[in-house]
Amino acid sequence: MASEQPDALLQIEDLHVSMGDREILRGVDLTILEGETHVLLGPNGGGKSTLLNTIVGMPGYRITQGRILFKGIDLDDMEIDERTRMGIGIAFQRPPAVRGVKLRRVIDVAAQGQLDDAAIGQLDEELSLGHMLERDVNMGFSGGEAKRSEMAQLLAQMPDLALFDEPESGVDLDNIAVVGAAMNALLKGEGRISERTRAGLIITHTGHILEFVNADVAHVLYNGRLACKGNPLDLIEEISSHGYDACVECKLCQTFS
């Protein structure tokens, strides 16, 4: 089991997670320090979205062993809203549509009523929200609009830990650039780690989002375990050339015991 570190923002220890009778995560250890941005790679069905959904507290994900610590506090019995207030935010791969609730209202709730019209206007300018603000959340939104909606909510919330589930999925190149710039602004990726305050965990299959976001380390989640880690661009290149099976054993990775 990983030892506790006083400067760890997120610390995951020997995490086993099941849905129904199926075990998906089989002993994940992961530490993210304040200011770090981590990338999560891996084949479909390997448990990447399960890990993010478990961190944020989505129903249906049952921790059978291990624990998740955020700011040194065990999240086990906390509801989603409690985790959100502690400083955890998430942008879903396929964000839900919410009939009867305007995007402007959700952004205001995410910001705990702290955004004035000028701040809303800045979000509108950065993310080209336009008429989306007065529409029901994600109702009839294109893929790019839904991702920009998610980013507006995260930028309003300004969480200490931001989780991103495939931010480039279903998004064209123009929207990837807009979403990527917003992610980098949120994570303050251009500054030194020692000068940053927020951390991120990003799931990506293609790696396209890393053209816009500075990431510090990548992990490969394989068969429910973190198989290796290394430089994000190096790992993506290795996977593109040889697949995940070869990546797990490659010399670029620092293999976990």
Image: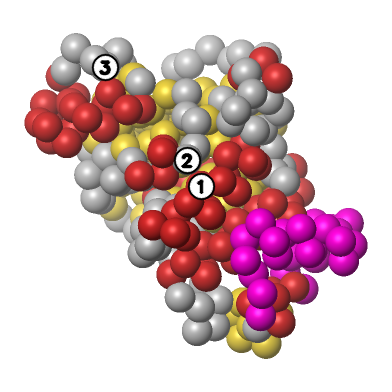
Dot 2 or dot 1: first in sequence order is: 1
**Residue plotted at (28% across, 23% down):** 234
What secondary structure is found at the residue carrying circle 1? helix
- List the residue tagged with mark 3: 253
Spot occupied by residue 57 in the image (x, y as percentages of width and height): 57, 51
Q: Secondary structure at mark 3?
A: loop
Can you say whether 92 is above or below 138 in the image? Answer: above
Tag of residue 158 = none
* Location of the C terminus (image quadrant): top left
Three-letter amino acid code of the residue under disc 1: Gly
Q: Is residue 131 above or below residue 128?
A: below
Residue 180 badge: 1
Q: Which mark is residue 212?
A: 2
Q: Nearer the viewer, mark 3 or mark 1?
A: 1
Residue 254 belongs to magenta span: no
Looking at marks 3 and 2 on the same chain, the residue that comes earlier in the sequence is marked by: 2
Q: Quadrant of residue 11?
A: top right
Is there a contact, CB below 8 Å, between mark 2 and mark 1? yes
Q: Position of residue 75 (x, y in %)?
A: 63, 40
Position of residue 192 relative to residue 112, above or below, is above
